[in-house]
Amino acid sequence: MNREEARRFALERLKASGLPRAALEADLLCTEALSCSRESLLAHPEEPVGPGQEKQLVSLLEARILRRPLAYIRGQASFWGMDLEVGEGCLVPRPETEILVETALELFHCGRFLDWGTGSGCVALAILSERNNSRGLMLEKSPAAIFWAWRNLSRTAFRDRALLWHGYSLESIPSSWVPLDMIVGNPPYIPTSKMASLMPDVRFYEPHQALDGGPDGLDDVKDILAGANRLLVPGGTVLLEIGGARQVNTLRSMPVEGLDLIRVKKDLSGKDRIVVWRHR
């Protein structure tokens, strides 16, 4: 078997399993198994594939056919120009969450911020990389996710400007970090009734506690808003990723002590995605 034959083999297996991005994923799995770049894979189709590499490719394909997330198989996900390590117990960063970062950077230029439910650390690390005069508190309740967040934070040049904190609520954060200039987060926002309809990649492998937001998808959002007033400086902001217009309507009608809802931002598909509050 050579590289071209390996690509065709991988493509056929993935297409037969019904994966929608079979061509791209076949190439990415080949690069993992053959320890080469995609450019090299395409430029040298005649290169032979060793028995061990062929066995590794088959193993990776079997995992993907069982819908194990591609990011878990490869051990990394791209976010904001960074290659982050991800794996079991950690939510895979999504492209739409980059809109959360974009919005945060529009409103936040320096100071202290809290990344609620940091997961892989993607949001906090993106903000820290763009704002040299900032410090970030990365709050996470899952020990498994903390493992990945630490692996990602520890590889950065700005790790001395961040604190990774194991905690379950806003009340658990260190008092030395209060007041905050911004609270940002991607809390669970999928209604419990919708969990069974998620793609198998997500439903069977990614952590449910990072996805399931309760009956209306807003359990954690409401907890954050209930405590934010006591933690923010006047004029400070809360930015949260949410799941659409229905949740926005609920949030607009919900009184929040000390905070005014000032902005709703859509994602590239036109879906309401980011909600912003300002402390009076």
Image: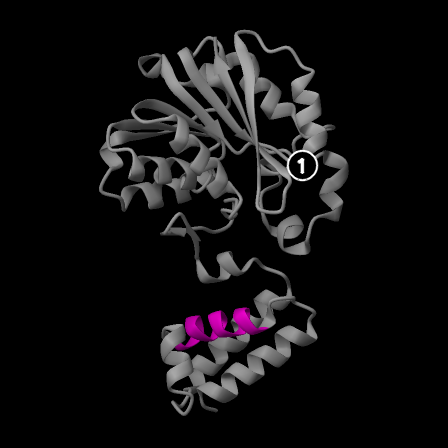
| Amino acid of disc 1 | Ile
Q: Quadrant of residue 245?
A: top right
* Residue 31, magenta (yes or no): yes
Q: Is residue 107 above or below residue 60?
A: above
Residue 133, position in %: x, y? 24, 28
Q: Quadrant of residue 233?
A: top left
- The one nearer the camera, 107 or 251, is 107
- Rendered residue at 29%/33% (across/down): 131
- Rendered residue at 34%/45% (across/down): 152
Instruction: Give the secondary structure at mark 1.
Output: loop
Residue 144, position in %: x, y? 47, 41
* Residue 22, magenta (yes or no): no
Dot 1: few (<14), some (14–19), or many (≥20) neighbours within 10 Å? many
Q: For the magenta stretch, what is the residue range?
A: 23-34
Q: Can you identify the residue that label 1 sits on?
A: 190
Residue 104 appears in the picture as rendered = yes
Q: Is residue 246 above or below residue 207?
A: above
- Residue 6 as seen in the image, left or right of residue 79: right
